[in-house]
Structure formats: structure tokens, C-alpha cells
Image (cartoon, rainbow, N blue to C red):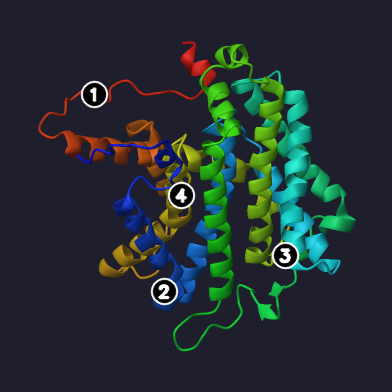
Amino acid sequence: MRIHFKTDYRQDLQLFADWQTFCYYLIAFVAAASAPFWLGEYLLGEMTYVLIWVIAGLGLMILVGHTGQVSLGHGAFLACGAYMQYNLIEAGVPFLIAFPLAGLFAGVIGALAAVPALKMSGIYLAIATLAFGIIVEDVIILLEHWTGGIEGVYISSIMIFGIDFDRYAGGLEPYAVPGHNFYWLCLVVALLATLFYRNLLRSPTGRAFIAIRDSEVSARAMGVNIARYKTLAFGLSCFFTGLAGALLAHFLSAFNYEAFLILISIQMLLMVTIGGLGSIHGAWFGAIIIGMLPVVITIMREEISSAMGLGNFTIPGLDQAVFAAVLIAFIMIEPLGIYGRWLKIRTWFQLFPLAKKDMFKRHKSYLKTERMR
């Protein structure tokens, strides 16, 4: 077991506990940054999709994991960011200006939507956000002039300082594949969002979010303005989600309201739950599972069919059924998610042979309704 003996308060402000931890993350960053040079076009596209999910997951994690507010309508804020990005780009606004404005628009809409929901919590808040998501779907169809209605829209390519960042733009032959610029753009945004989130948790605002999550009564007794910080949490959460929606618009190129149905909101909530509520790692792990698991299932099905001589034999809905079964198994077997399971394994090895069997029997809950049982 490594013991960190701190001798200065400034050590608590460090992003990494020690140099060994820093090296681990540096290796992961180098591997991710060099992915276009050793991945094919298909897998690079899937990795780009995962990075977009990471940004959206970080946004939802602020609200669900660190403030304790359940949302089933975050797909609506993906749509807000995507359609605002489309309108700004088509109006000739440069990407470097349009991109943050799209996130800001989604954040403002989220903060306004949070005002009538401040008195709600638990299942009631979930129902309210679900209703908001359904309303936004109808609004997208009605605002046909800006959203393309049912037919949808086609967004132009990203140009930054004369460099094409389109998903299908050519790569640096023969080392990279098409889409490497867009992948690096998504990677930079995901890393910046992670660093901002990491610093947010160490700030008084982040500590207020956690206090509200653990106990609103105690937070109010300590002088935390519950209404203000809940609204701020909604705004920041929707801001990140809007940024993800803007990138998703460029990833899809052509899209309509069906890209942001309520199923996307449920999938986002599953993502942060499976990854591990209350941790930045959980957003990354959940995005990897949600983004890559369907690909792995498809590849395994094709390999098994080929090995058994079944050719292109398929069962309609099989991939979705296996995907859903795996997600249910994650939730039933490990309530703390993938990151929670990793912490248990790491602690067991650190304490071996002194680790006790039931040392993780009591699981921490993040929902007020669960704490009151």
C-alpha cells in the first residue's frame, strides 16, 4: 500500500497524488492521442463517438453524481446544443465562437428549466425532466425554419484557421485515417472538460454541490443557498451536454429530432450509473461501455456466426437484447459501477491478506429517496 505523507497544504491542490499516478495518466493520454496512427477508420469513428459521450457524461455527472438530482431529459439539451450549433455555423459564425455559444445556449435553457423544478427531488424531478424532454421533441418539429422539422438538417464542415476538421476529411497518409482531425478536436474538448470538472470539485461551488447531494438539510444549515446551487448545477450540466450535442451534430453531419429521442436520455443516465456515480472516472468508463459494447457484441456475433458456418445469420434485435442484458447485469452485480468495482479490487490487493470479506457490504447512496428508507 502506498501512503501519501503530506507536509504542505499545497499538496492538496495538486491534480495528481504523486508522480506514479501522473505517469499512468500520461501513458493513457499518449495512447489516446496516437490512436489515429494505429486504428482503422471504423474504430477511430467509434472512439470519437465515445469521446462525445464522455463530454455528455461529465455534464450529467455534475447533476446526478455530485448534486444528487436525477434527470431523464438530458437528451433535450443535446438537441439544444446541436441545433444552435447548426444555426450558428450556417449563419457564418466561426466554429471557435459558435461552439461555446451552443453550449451556453443549452446551459441557459437548462437553468431556466430548473427554476420550476427546484422544489422537486427524486422520482418527481425525474418525471419533470422526462416531460421536458418530450416537449422539446415536439418543439423541434414545430420550429421547422430553424430545425428542419421532420426532414432534419445537414451541417457544414468545421474549419479552424483553414484546417478541415470534418469527420470524413482525409488523413495524413499513410499514417492516419480520415477523421483524425475531428477525433483530436473531440479529445481536446474532453480533456479540457475533465480538467474543468476536476477543479470544480475542489472549489467551494463543487463542495456545495456535494453537500446538497448528501443532505439538503445539513447543507442549508451550513449556509448553502440550495436554490442557487441547484440552478447552477443544472446550468453547468446542460452547458457540457450542449457542447457534446454540438460535436454530435458534426459527427452525424445530417440529423433530425429522432437523434435526440427520450431513449438517449435514458442511455445517458445508464452511462453514469454503470460507470460509477460520483466520480470523473465513472463518466469515462461509462462512455466506453455505452459506446464500445455494441461494437464488441456485433464483432463477436459475426465471429461466432463465421466459426459455426452460419454466414450472415442474424436474429432481429439480438444485439440490442444482449446489450440490455449486460447493462442490467452491471447494475445488479455492482451498484457502485465499474469505478466502484475497481476501487474494491484495488483496496483488496492493498490490504491483502488483511482484507475482510464484508468490508464493502454497506454501499453509499446518492439519492435522497434511498437515504430515507
Q: Which residue is mark 3?
A: 96
Structural distance between the alpha carbons of marks 1 and 2: 41 Å
Q: Nearer the viewer, residue 220 or 316?
A: 220
The three-letter code of the residue at mark 1 reads Met
Tag nearer the camera, 2 or 4: 4
Structural distance between the alpha carbons of marks 3 and 4: 25 Å
The three-letter code of the residue at mark 4 reads Trp
* Residue 326 visible (yes or no): yes
Q: Residue furthest front?
A: 8
Q: Earlier in the sequence, mark 2 or mark 4?
A: 2
Tag nearer the camera, 3 or 4: 3
Q: Which residue is mark 2?
A: 39
The three-letter code of the residue at mark 2 reads Leu
**Vertical order, 147 against 225 (above or below):** below
Marks 1 and 2 close (CB-CB < 8 Å): no
* Mark identifier at residue 284: 4
Q: Nearer the viewer, residue 9 or 360?
A: 9
Q: Earlier in the sequence, mark 3 or mark 1?
A: 3
Structural distance between the alpha carbons of marks 2 and 4: 20 Å
Q: Earlier in the sequence, mark 1 or mark 2?
A: 2
Question: Which of the image's four quarters has the N terminus?
Answer: top left
Name the spot of residue 7 as percent of width and height, x first: 33, 36
The quadrant in which residue 97 appears is bottom right
Dot 3 falls on a residue whose secondary structure is helix
Name the spot of residue 318 as percent of width and height, x first: 43, 52
Within 10 angstroms of label 2, few (less than 14), some, or many (20 or more) residues? Answer: some
Dot 1 falls on a residue whose secondary structure is loop
Within 10 angstroms of label 1, few (less than 14), some, or many (20 or more) residues? Answer: few
Marks 3 and 4 close (CB-CB < 8 Å): no
Structural distance between the alpha carbons of marks 4 and 1: 26 Å
